[in-house]
Amino acid sequence: MVSIFIVPIIVAINKIDKPEADIEKTKQELMQMGLELEDHGGDVQVVPISALKGINLPLLAEAVSTQATLMGLKADYTGLVEGVVVESKTDARRGKLSTAIVKRGTLRKGAVLVSGLAHARVRGLFDHNGKPLDQAEPGTPVEILGWRELPLAGDLIIEVESEKKASSVLRWRQQEAQKEKAELSLEEIRKKEEEHLAKYRAERDARRLAGWFRKRSGTRSKEITETDNGTARVSVIIKGDVHGSVEAILDVLETYTGNDKCRLDVVHYGVGNVSETDVELAKSFNAIIYAFAVEPPTKAPPGVSIRCCNIIYRLIDDLKEEISAKLPPLEVEEIVGEANVLQQFFITEGRKEIPVAGCRCTKGILKKSQKFRLLRDNEVLYDGSLESMRHLKNEVDTIKKDVECGLRLKDTKIVPQPSDVIVCYSTRTETQKTDWDPGF
């Protein structure tokens, strides 16, 4: 699994302040995953920390600095800026913001940036505490204000000379994206989706084991079109405070595999508070709006369900309940009793001979009001109700264990034979629950 990483690794073992923390056991598990730790002659540094209480955080920073020194990492403070987007969000007061790491050059106010299909003229720079900065040098995490559109987490940021140049770059990128999409046939698209899905699942499983975040290589389709093939469905709209939250939720939703029983459709997703457009879309698709760490409308619109949450697993639990409510009830059988056929005999009604099974109840009880199944060599020959149940020539409603009786089936064409088995059973309905396992 470790072979998928092509960069040096520093491991931070968190939550060492908890009583049940076992650092040595964790190190052994890391070694089983293929990591060669410094304690055992390898080159992977391990730093036990507590992010909550600030324990050993200076040691972690020192480990990163040491690794950078060993690798000879240096940055160019001059020239056009390059960086990478870590997170994007819409702030209620300041507007569209992205958190980024500067990789090259020195970022200042007034710079024109392009990232993916988004661009900005920098109107403000802020540190992690929200304090204004005059500039951001390589290696500096910085919040950038001034985006026209929100860039995606993981996208590269480049500085260009002017807004005219930025517009030119964006037009070219949009044209290239459309051209690439037009040139791909439907079969090629499906093949790429299958390959991407297989790769994504493998990397996702690896990330879950290792706790790593993968840079996305593309964007998701933001909306779907409605289809109707009679399958139950739950439609949702996801709104989150930042791209990372939305992407994390979408990652979990992609683990859903029960579309054959109940379709799960993400009709739209995005960053920011719930808007009127979201509400109208929810009405059109009869969708639930999940507002993750964002503000809902002050007045809930009629006919639209808006659910607020701050923890992903609670959102998923609520969604699982919605899916389960859409599933049809299950019919469950319960064995009431069994009987062995000892002999067959016939009774005459008019000119017609009717077969009757002479039986002994061997398990439970036999109830005339329940359903009966006749089996011969484990093959079902009859499944239905009884016409008659007699004991000593008297019609009865029940037969207890070890009591002999005569059973007459509704279907007179079925002739019971000695050694056949007759099973008495009842049915009841149970609420069906989704078997979706999101992995937590």
Image (cartoon, grey):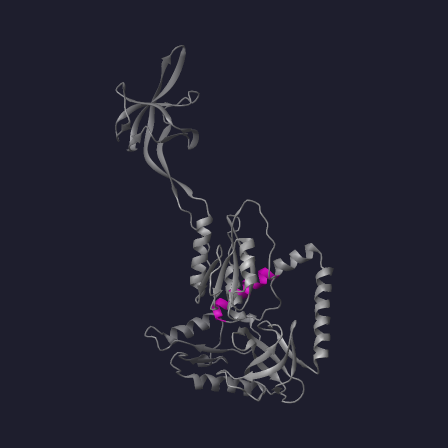
What residue do we see at 51% from left, 56% from top?
256
Q: Position of residue 7 (x, y in %)?
A: 56, 77
Q: Position of residue 229 (x, y in %)?
A: 57, 45
> In the shown orientation, is residue 239 left or right of residue 192?
left
Nearest the eye: 422 or 107? 107
Q: Magenta-highlighted stretch: main secondary structure?
A: helix
Among the 4 quarters of the image, the one containing residue 185: bottom right
> In the shown orientation, is residue 291 left or right of residue 137?
left
In the rendered view, would you say 357 is above or below 350?
below
Number of marks in the image?
A: 0
In the rendered view, would you say 39 is above or below 221?
below
Q: Is residue 67 magenta?
A: no
In the rendered view, would you say 199 is above or below 94?
above
User: What is the span of residues highlighted in magenta in the rendered image?
Assistant: 196-211
Nearest the eye: 297 or 192? 297
Q: Position of residue 103 (x, y in %)?
A: 60, 83
What residue do we see at 49% from left, 71% from top?
34
Nearest the eye: 390 or 52? 52
Q: Position of residue 6 (x, y in %)?
A: 58, 75
In the rendered view, would you say 396 is above or below 438?
above
> In the shown orientation, is residue 237 left or right of residue 40?
right
What residue do we see at 57% from left, 89% from top?
134
What residue do we see at 59% from left, 52% from top?
226
Nearest the eye: 281 or 365? 281
Among the 4 quarters of the image, the one containing residue 23: bottom left
Among the 4 quarters of the image, the one containing residue 202: bottom right
Q: Identify the image quadrant of the C terminus.
A: bottom left
Does residue 342 show up? Answer: yes
Residue at the top extreme of this rendering: 351
